[in-house]
Amino acid sequence: MIVSCPVLTRDRRIPAVHAYGGVPGAANLSLPISWNDVPPGTRSFLLTIIDRHPVARRWVHWCVVNIPASIRSLPEGASGNRVLLPGGCVEVENGFGEPGYGGPMPPKGSGPHEYVINLHALSVERLAAGREDTMRELENRIEGKVLASASVVGIFER
């Protein structure tokens, strides 16, 4: 399986329009993500974006559960948009305590942060998931259900 984010620059930088409030040029517009080479038997997908910088401590920027198996992309700005986000998807609370996408906003001077965009192909159509679920709970629920995983890393720094 291959996952990509077409707005990443050649040096993998995330454009400021995708950053969270407080960053110049920010619009908190969710990143466009696409994928292909899906394994047979895939019944749904789980998407996460996590900041793995030591300062961030695995800060969750976006988590979408129950993406239908027929979907191969989420367009830019899909978070919170009933037209762009496929029906049945659940957007879990991000690290800011809000459901949906919360873009990069690393502390000033903390250096470049790596935002891991992870996609898991799952053998189940639906996971029991609510907006308040934690990443640890979701990781436990997908155990034994992951057919394949793929990731791409974007970088943001203030």
Image (cartoon, rainbow, N blue to C red):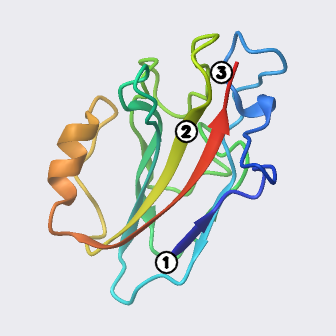
Crowding around mark 2 (Cα neighbors within 10 Å: few <14, some 14 to 19, many 20+) is many
Q: Position of residue 52 (x, y in %)?
A: 43, 36
- Read off the residue under disc 2: 114
Of mark 3 and mark 2, the one earlier in the sequence is: 3
Q: Position of residue 3 (x, y in %)?
A: 57, 66
Q: CA distance from mark 3 to mark 2?
A: 15 Å
Question: Label 3's element?
Answer: loop
Identify which residue is drawn at 40% across, 29% down.
93
Identify which residue is drawn at 36% across, 79% down.
42
Residue 81 seen from this side: no
- Read off the residue under disc 1: 1
- Read off the residue under disc 3: 20
Q: CA distance from mark 3 to mark 1?
A: 29 Å
Crowding around mark 1 (Cα neighbors within 10 Å: few <14, some 14 to 19, many 20+) is some
Of mark 1 and mark 2, the one earlier in the sequence is: 1
Identify which residue is drawn at 21% across, 69% down.
145
Q: Amino acid at mark 2?
A: Glu
Left or right: where does residue 154 sit relative to residue 140? right
Using the image, determine if residue 93 lies above or below residue 155. above
Q: CA distance from mark 1 to mark 2?
A: 21 Å
Q: Position of residue 149 (x, y in %)?
A: 39, 68
Q: Quadrant of the C terminus?
A: top right
Q: Residue furthest bottom?
A: 40
In contact (CB < 8 Å): disc 3 and disc 2:
no
Q: Residue 108 lies in what quarter of the image?
A: top right
Question: Label 2's element?
Answer: strand
Of mark 3 and mark 1, the one earlier in the sequence is: 1
Crowding around mark 3 (Cα neighbors within 10 Å: few <14, some 14 to 19, many 20+) is many
Q: Amino acid at mark 1?
A: Met
In contact (CB < 8 Å): disc 3 and disc 1:
no
Q: Amino acid at mark 3?
A: Tyr
Left or right: where does residue 80 sit relative to residue 61? right
